Amino acid sequence: MSTGVSRGTSRTVHVPLPGREYDVVIGAGVLEQAGALMVPLLRRKRVAIVTDTHVAERHLARVVEILAASGIAAESLVLPAGEATKAWGPLGTTVDWLLAQRIERSDLVVALGGGVIGDLVGFAAAILRRGVRFVQVPTTLLAQVDSSVGGKTGINSVHGKNLIGAFHQPVLVLADTDVLTTLPRREFLAGYGEVVKYGLLGDAGFFDWLEVNGPAMAAGDVVARIHAVTRSVRMKAEIVIRDETEQGDRALLNLGHTFCHALEAATGYSDRLLHGEGVAIGCGLAFELSARLGLCSQEEPGRVRAHLQAMGMRVGLADIPGDLPGAEELLALMGQDKKVVDGTLRFILARGIGEAFVTADVPKEAVLGLLRDGLAGR
Ligand code: NAD
Ligand code: GLY
């Protein structure tokens, strides 16, 4: 695939939710259009940007400059980087800061960062003055392909991940693939876990494409990156349009997440396991479980693992450093999953690559056996 792409090359995915529709603008250099795209959304030319320390160091000054070129004044709040920021303390800091900035309903809040900033700032915007509009400027691959689109916002609780939150759609998403050049490789590959998820859950052709083009994409191929982000966002948008508040189909987007959330809790939401790494490992486990239950062929989990391995990613429980609790405790941690209904766990399983479905019909012993075998391989 060619690496040459003219600056400004962009794709737009429209998310036509009635009364809350918005565009996701994707491409190399689209950040340059931030001012022009925001001016029509503003009554007064003023925005509040919330970001984290890592992103501020690399991208904040440029964003402020781009907005200033369109006459938009920007104040900014810089929060500590990391998952621990998705908590009550930083949420309170953010809301109080936005109030101190006298941000009104007709103003815009800008979430400049990865999924942590997007989730936290989106939630702050949802509860500020009972709802202020916000723009997502996702700066990680994970945020560009997943968390910035669809309106799930929130923070973590001591009881589990993402348990406090609201649905609040952004009014614009600006996904500039150029900002991914400053992203550490480990973070890029973690985001790639969510990209693979889209192929696995609903598009076998996209998974075939990733098997061929994934390595070039990770190496920096801009055209491949734009294609992968656009395909992922289209799939997410199609599902969100059908089921915004996760009454049905949207749960498919959680392929791998039941395992992932338990593993993240077990590793203390720490650097030991990034969210996207947990998703990739969780997808592998979901396919292994599907094969064990006779839902898909024995070859499919092997193919999933082989692709993750070829990308240099973490593949199974054996790749998580440090101690892990036993299978029973991991299963108990899954009990806090938001897909639990009447105490029954629901899993996303697959009849093959690209053919995921939601089911509550999973014997506990099959899950325990899978976890025990994975833990024994450590
Ligand atoms: P993150 O926001 O913590 O970003 C990862 C790291 O990369 C951080 O250290 C950050 O400071 C740094 N970073 C961000 N952009 C950078 C850049 N361009 N250059 C250099 N460093 C940069 O993590 P994430 O992986 O983006 O998001 C994970 C979070 O997203 C989790 O909390 C997860 O629950 C959430 N999530 C939400 C949804 C949703 O639908 N709302 C979907 C998936 C994941
Ligand atoms: N990332 C899962 C969802 O947005 O529903």
Image (cartoon, rainbow, N blue to C red):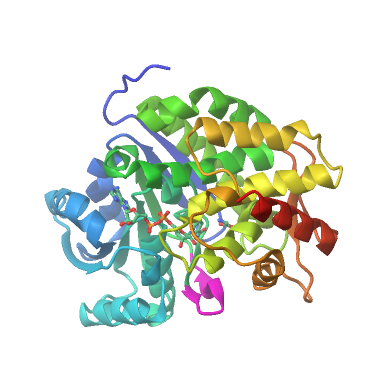
Give how far across and how far down residue 161 sits, in percent.
53, 70
What residue do we see at 59% from left, 43% from top? 197
Residue 111, image quadrant: bottom left
| Quadrant (top left, top right, bottom left, bottom right) of the N terminus | top left
Residue 141 in the image: above or below residue 206: below
Residue 175, image quadrant: top left
Instruction: Judge left or right: residue 107 versus residue 279.
Output: left
Instruction: Judge left or right: residue 321 versus residue 94.
Output: right
Total numbered labels placed on residues in the image: 0
Look at the image and tell me whether residue 132 can be seen.
no
In this view, which residue lies farthest toward the top? 2
Q: Is residue 159 magenta?
A: yes
Q: Main secondary structure of the magenta part?
A: strand
Instruction: Judge left or right: residue 301 versus residue 4.
Output: right
Give how far across and how far down residue 102 sits, in percent.
23, 79
What residue do we see at 31% from left, 34% from top? 28
Q: Nearer the viewer, residue 31 or 374?
A: 374
Q: Which range is magenta?
A: 156-168
Give how far across and how far down residue 374 sits, in percent.
67, 51
What residue do we see at 21% from left, 57% from top? 56
What residue do we see at 49% from left, 24% from top? 213
> If the picture is divided into quarters, which one holds ligand 1?
bottom left
Residue 285 in the image: above or below residue 310: below
Look at the image and tell me whether residue 340 can be seen.
yes
Q: Nearer the viewer, residue 353 or 273?
A: 273
Residue 272 in the image: above or below residue 216: below
Q: Nearer the viewer, residue 280 or 172?
A: 280
Q: Is residue 343 magenta?
A: no
Give how far across and how far down residue 295 sits, in percent.
84, 42
